[in-house]
Image (cartoon, grey):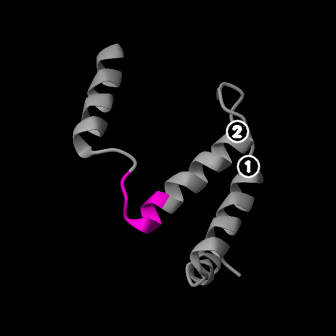
Amino acid sequence: MTAQQILEQALQLNDEERLIVASSLLKSVEAPQTDRRNNEEWIAEIGRRAQAALSGSPAMTWKDARARIEKRLDLM
């Protein structure tokens, strides 16, 4: 089975099942050592973001996101 076939099947799952699959996949990949958050924190964050995306509520407004991006670019 190819990754594309697995993805197509996974996308047919309900929201909760997709979150379980996504979480399990994330757990299977080691985070870089420079990452300040541990795997459990990232998995929780991904879960929150996925739920927000699936419910249609943005994590932040475009105005806030743009300001955050511009601030980061100024630091470089």
Q: Quadrant of the C terminus?
A: top left
Q: Position of residue 40 (x, y in %)?
A: 73, 43
Mark count: 2
- Contact check, label 1 and label 2, Cβ < 8 Å: yes
Compared to residue 39, the image places residue 70 above or below, namely: above
- Is 72 part of what is drawn in magenta? no
Residues under labels 1 and 2: Cα distance? 6 Å
Q: Quadrant of the N terminus?
A: bottom right
Near-viewer residue (47 or 74): 47
**Disc sitting over residue 29 in the figure:** 1
Q: Position of residue 43 (x, y in %)?
A: 67, 49
Task: Quickly name the residue at label 2.
Answer: 31
Q: Amino acid at mark 2?
A: Ala
Q: Secondary structure at mark 1?
A: loop
Q: Secondary structure at mark 2?
A: loop
Residue depicted at 28% across the width and 36% down the height: 64
Q: Which residues are magenta?
A: 52-58
Residue depicted at 46% across the width and 58% down the height: 52
Residue depicted at 59% across the width and 46% down the height: 45
Q: Position of residue 19 (x, y in %)?
A: 63, 66
Compared to residue 76, the image places residue 54 above or below, namely: below
Q: Amino acid at mark 1?
A: Val
